[in-house]
Amino acid sequence: MRLSPKLVTLAALVLAAALCYVSATAAAGLIERGSQSAVKTALIEGGHDWAGVETDGLQVILSGTAPSEAARFRALSTTGSVVDASRVIDQIEVQPAKPIEAPKFSIEILRNDEGVSMIGLIPAEVDRDAFADRVALAVGERVGITDLLETADYPLPEGWDTAVEFGLYALEMLPRSKVSISADRVAVTAISSSGAEKRRLETSLAREAPEGVRLVVDITAPRPVITPFTLRFLIDESGTARFDACSADTEETRRRILSAAASAGLQGRADCVLGLGVPTPDWAEAAEQAIAAVGELGGGSVTFSDADISLVALAGTEQTAFDKVVGELESNLPDVFSLTSKLPEKASVDGTGEAEQGPPEFVATRSPEGRVQLRGRVTNEQVREAVKSFAQASFGSEAVYLATRLDPDLPDGWPIRVLAGLTALSELNSGSVVVQPAYIEVRGITGNPDAKAEIARHLAEKLGEGAHFEIAVTYEARLDPLADLPTPEQCLAKIVAINEATKITFEPSSTEITGPAVGVMDKIAEVLKGKCSEIEFAFEIGGHTDSQGRETMNQQLSQQRADAVLNALMERRVLTGRITAIGYGEEQPIADNETEEGREANRRIEFKLSATGDEAEEAGVGEADEAEGENPSEDTADDGASDAEESEAETTGE
């Protein structure tokens, strides 16, 4: 059959059209793929891997979220360098800009004899001139102040005024110091003139620190100048050896003195204060010989006051033995030392001070309430008034009761002995001093661990050669204002004990603290807001799970529960700046995860000390046993669901 020319022509046109369409479609697809690939490559090379690229014909569509408007513009420019800009469709979103956070405001005030310097950043609303006036008032109007402060226009942070007030209080107390102040923290670095002043300053700062302000104190006391350089070693009638005072100029001297005392019968712990002012390099040699002499006599005391040595044997010591020991000591002592020795009769101390017969006597007593009674004999009216004034200055005018009588026949130096005795009494919280012509006795209790040494040093200096005195003073930590503060270990032990008594528990699929755990958090908060708030105390809240389920979910759940404990403390107004919350998941089991009991033990909250935010030596562990509780349906975290299953349920909404 022969086709007509018209049909052939029509068929040819249709075929040509089809071929053109296929060719055009293929070419368009090739262009789309080429454009998409080229643009994507250029964006990745330009660091814009956040951008998505799609093509629709000749159009190139950009999408994604740019980190900033500048990044969006750079991505468009990069695309425009590959394809015609008119072909680019911009569907890019820009990440919302984060609000600018307020800077960390802080002031560092340095004070020394030359003046005061202020460095740091403060809110613009603070009146700098008024603040400088406050600093001048704290340190003295005549001190020059260098103001190097900068300002930023942000609101005052919460707690700023309170911290500044306390910082200025610390600055006023410390003439050589650096005080760093921020809204929730005051750090004090200072130098004190003595160990006693260091203790006083630390106590005052700890007591005055306001709630909400963490105090960091670093006060150093340089090696003290000991005047007179004093050592007092004795063996009493019961054979007990001890130091009332011990001074040494070097570590080696201290070692030699303590070794000699141990050889003479000293038992237990003893120490010597390292200080300046030793009268001679031969101090250690003289101390060794004198201590050995007391040991050879079998009792008595030896007192060094600089280069003057007083050796007093026990009453009843044989004269022959006494002469032998004293003679050998005099012959062997280094030349600079002067020895005075005494073999006394038994001192009669009846404490009454009222008898007409017997040795003259002056007695001062101090009650635990602070009342001071002065009885016995004084030389004349002028001495009585001097004693009264001295006592009132030392103990308070309302606390002193005077009941002395005049005796013009008292021995020379009596007023000095009486005043020395009153000074010794001022070191005691309660006790008594008995003064006789050849003997002084000091008895009582004190909250100053250095009181015995200070009394010995003072009496040795004031009474001179041949001084014969006894110090029976007991240190009681309950009277020590610094010893009354707990250690970090003691604070943590209280927290652990609370948690062990009633463990922190969570309901299944929950990170909320409910039920008995609320009371646990209340008790822990009370500990942290009590005396434990007055010390440097950093610790970690660790969350742990068993090994059931997925490791990632276990870690997330343990972190959420540790955070819940931390947030509960914050809600109770506990300062949490030095508390960290860490979730360990299943990484640190303490029992076998193959048993129900083991898994139960592994699901826990731990508290442990941390020195600087890093892991420190574990000081205590409190388990949060999620299976604990009277109602298993509410408190048992393993009742048909492991920790991981609970977390999975939270994620999926089951």
Image (cartoon, rainbow, N blue to C red):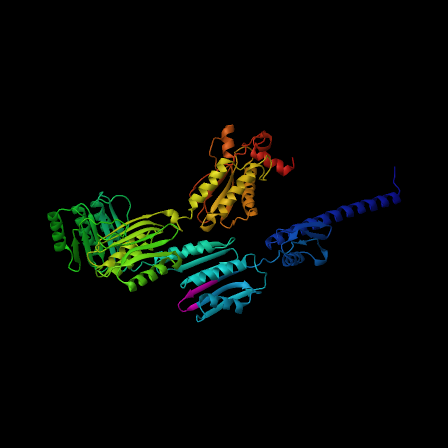
Seen at 35% across and 60% down, the residue is 193
Where residue 321 sits: x, y (%)?
12, 47
Q: Quadrant of residue 275?
A: bottom left
Q: Which residues are magenta?
A: 108-115
Q: Does any portion of residue 299 appear in the rendered image?
A: yes
Quadrant of image for the N terminus:
top right
- Extreme residue in the top direction: 595
Seen at 64% across and 37% down, the residue is 652
In the displayed structure, does residue 633 sit left or right of residue 237? Answer: right
Q: Does any portion of residue 275 appear in the rendered image?
A: no
Quadrant of image for the C terminus:
top right
Q: Quadrant of residue 2?
A: top right
417 lies above or below 574: below
Where residue 503 sits: x, y (%)?
52, 36
The total number of labels drawn is: 0
Question: Of 344 and 462, which appears nearest the observer?
Answer: 344
Question: Of 201 and 508, which appears nearest the observer?
Answer: 201
